[in-house]
Amino acid sequence: PLSPLRVPIHSLHPSVATYVPNHTTTTMLGRHLHRFPVRIPAALFRALSSSSSVGTAPLSGPKSTATALYFWGSNSHSQLPTLEGSTFTSPRRVNISEVIASLDYEADGDPKPDDVTLKHFRVGKGANTALTFTRRGKDEDRTYVYGDGKYVKAGRVEGLPDAGVEDVVLGPSNLAVVVGVEDRQRVYMCGLGGSVLHGFGQLGLGPNVADEGKDYVAVPELVESLVEDETPLQGLALAANHSVALTAPLDGGEATEVLTAGSGQYGKLGNVDAVDQLYFEPVETLSLLPEPCVQVSAGSTFTYALDASGVVHSWGKNEAGQLGLGGGLSMDVYAMESMPQPLEALEQIGERVRQVAAGYNHGAALGE
């Protein structure tokens, strides 16, 4: 769809609906491209609601007091901890105690502790999984990555503070670890920061161009451009070649700030000029909105921000209608918006959006 499709979900809640903009390759919506809202039959909701969406990682991973994890799908890069086999077509149970038993505590010269528990877990956009473990009653956290080690090294994530890991965000080729320090957050990032072909800066660490025209960081480094003003964070999203962060209100205020870094191709950083940003910089026009932004999400070549009044703002590449701004079917591969644009199709029908998510070249919004 080139603009949002309405998905009634009255069977779950009478005041909630889902809108799906952008490109689709399925026949469930009846067309391959939609640029304006189209109603989706309620009977389809059960199928749609089971799909995962790509969007902002809230700065708190899934907390676990359970004894088991369940994994399924491809295990081509050993991204499913302790499981042997290439593909699992149904969920397989993994005892958390078995995963803990495989950890490398003895490598530090200490006996393996018996008070280790799973703190939270994340499944990445690439072929990897991240698990963070903690010790009961002690300030000691360890994060491990399982799977493809091409850009993000598999094994224990080194270079982090000893404690305070609040969340882990796995991008297609990079990793961010959010560490709480008092009432603020510190973000550490590593992985592929860009290339000559696709642009540089998605780690927000400044110039760090290595040989062969690639920017690669093996051990997570503190993202200084996200801590300069000592502003707490409430959202972080990683895409293929750019990243977006959202600050939280400071000292009881309401103001927030959306910051982007990485490749400026297709205007996906939202600052008019299609140039790379090596550090996180604010999207200036969003700071002028009457209501602060409350959520961000990053698609492959585009970005969403949701403000407190329920309005979605989108920018970046739009060849498949992923911005939800409408347009004719003659839109070409160069269609784009280099500044945030309000998604008027939802405003015109009086829809107040509660949550937005960006996929590869499609999006979704939860309305009320």
Image (cartoon, grey):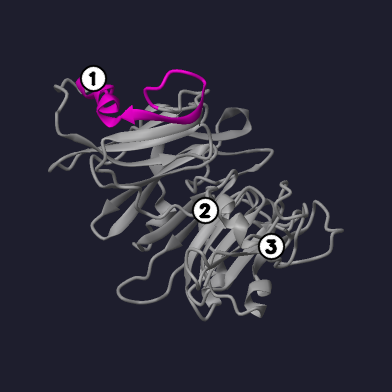
Is disc 2 placed on a helix, strand or loop?
A: loop
Q: Decide: is 338 above or below 46.
A: below
Residue 143 visible within the image: no
Q: Position of residue 114 (x, y in %)?
A: 14, 29
Residue 362 visible within the image: yes
Is disc 3 placed on a helix, strand or loop?
A: strand
Is disc 1 placed on a helix, strand or loop?
A: helix
Q: Position of residue 195 (x, y in %)?
A: 62, 37
Disc on the earlier residue, 3 or 2: 2
Disc on the earlier residue, 1 or 3: 1
Are the residues flagged by discs 3 and 2 in contact, CB closer than 8 Å? no
Q: Nearer the viewer, residue 196 or 342?
A: 342
Q: Amino acid at mark 2?
A: Gly
The magenta stretch is 81-107
Q: Quick check: 349 left or right of 183?
A: right
Q: CA distance from mark 1 to mark 3?
A: 50 Å
Q: Which residue has dot 3 on it?
A: 338
Mark 3 neighbour density, 10 Å: few (under 14) some (14–19) many (20 or more): many
Residue, far right: 330
Q: Position of residue 38 (x, y in %)?
A: 71, 66
Residue 100 on the magenta span: yes
Q: Residue at x 58, y 52 (%)?
A: 48
Q: Amino acid at mark 3?
A: Ser
Q: Decide: is 232 above or below 172.
A: below
Q: Residue at x 37, y 22 (%)?
A: 82
Q: CA distance from mark 2 to mark 1?
A: 36 Å
Q: Amino acid at mark 1?
A: Ala
Q: Quick check: 5 left or right of 55?
A: right
Name the image quarter holding residue 131. Answer: top left
Label of residue 55 in the image: 2
